[in-house]
Amino acid sequence: MLDFFYPDFYFEKFDEVTVEFLKANNISALLLDLDNTLAPYEMSEPDEKILAYLSDLSKNGIRFAFISNNSSDKRINLFNKKIGAPAFAKAGKPFAKKTINRALSTLGVSKENAAFLGDQIFTDVCAGKFNGIRAILVPPIKDKKNLFFKFKRALEKPVLKRYFRKNKR
């Protein structure tokens, strides 16, 4: 049962998910969470590190789309302005089947060749798992400190502990 909450892969930072790693695992498309995965909440536009990473993906034939639960199209559109990738706000992760299918269709990639990259088990990892897509987890860049996020992170801790024990980390 808990396997459903386990990511397929875990990295310390998004840019450790390299083109070489993706190609070695037959992944030709990444569905990317934005907030706390690629950038902290307060970063409205991508920095040079993010732009270089996404450019490297593109140059090497790795397609990507942003999939966010952010309630504002404005946030994701501003961040995406310089990038121009397919972007979907108000996704409803983890139950984002329609959005994920639209993203994969837009990218022209099957589920078998896609992965979901995010910082939250109960939204990003589960969104991938619910939809038959591999899930890549990274720790949050800078977590929100409100009660909801503290509670959610507390629930993630035992899952991560078991995941790391099972995967000898």
Image (cartoon, rainbow, N blue to C red):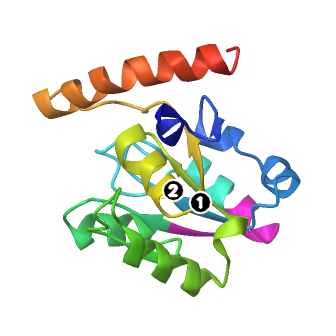
Left or right for 12, reference 97: right
Q: Residue at x 33, y 62 (%)?
A: 95
The residue tagged 1 is 133
State yes or no: residue 123 in magenta. no
Left or right for 42, reference 158: left
Binning the other alpha carbons within 10 Å of mark 1 as few (below 14), some (14 to 19) or many (20 upward) gives many
Find the magenta span and give its range: 55-65
Which amino acid does the dot numbered 1 rest on?
A: Ile
User: Considering only vertical position in the picture, is 67 above or below 17?
Assistant: below
Q: Position of residue 112 (x, y in %)?
A: 70, 67
Q: Residue at x 79, y 69 (%)?
A: 59
Identify which residue, 167 or 137, lies in the foreground: 167
Identify which residue, 76 or 29, lies in the foreground: 29
Which amino acid does the dot numbered 2 rest on?
A: Gly
User: Considering only vertical position in the picture, is 20 above or below 138?
Assistant: below
Which quadrant of the figure contains the C terminus?
Answer: top right
Q: Residue at x 35, y 56 (%)?
A: 94
Q: Quadrant of residue 132?
A: bottom right
Q: Are marks 2 and 1 in contact (CB under 8 Å)?
A: yes
User: Considering only vertical position in the picture, is 28 above or below 41?
Assistant: below
Q: Position of residue 142 (x, y in %)?
A: 36, 30
Which residue is farthest front? 1
The residue tagged 2 is 128
Q: Earlier in the sequence, mark 2 or mark 1?
A: 2
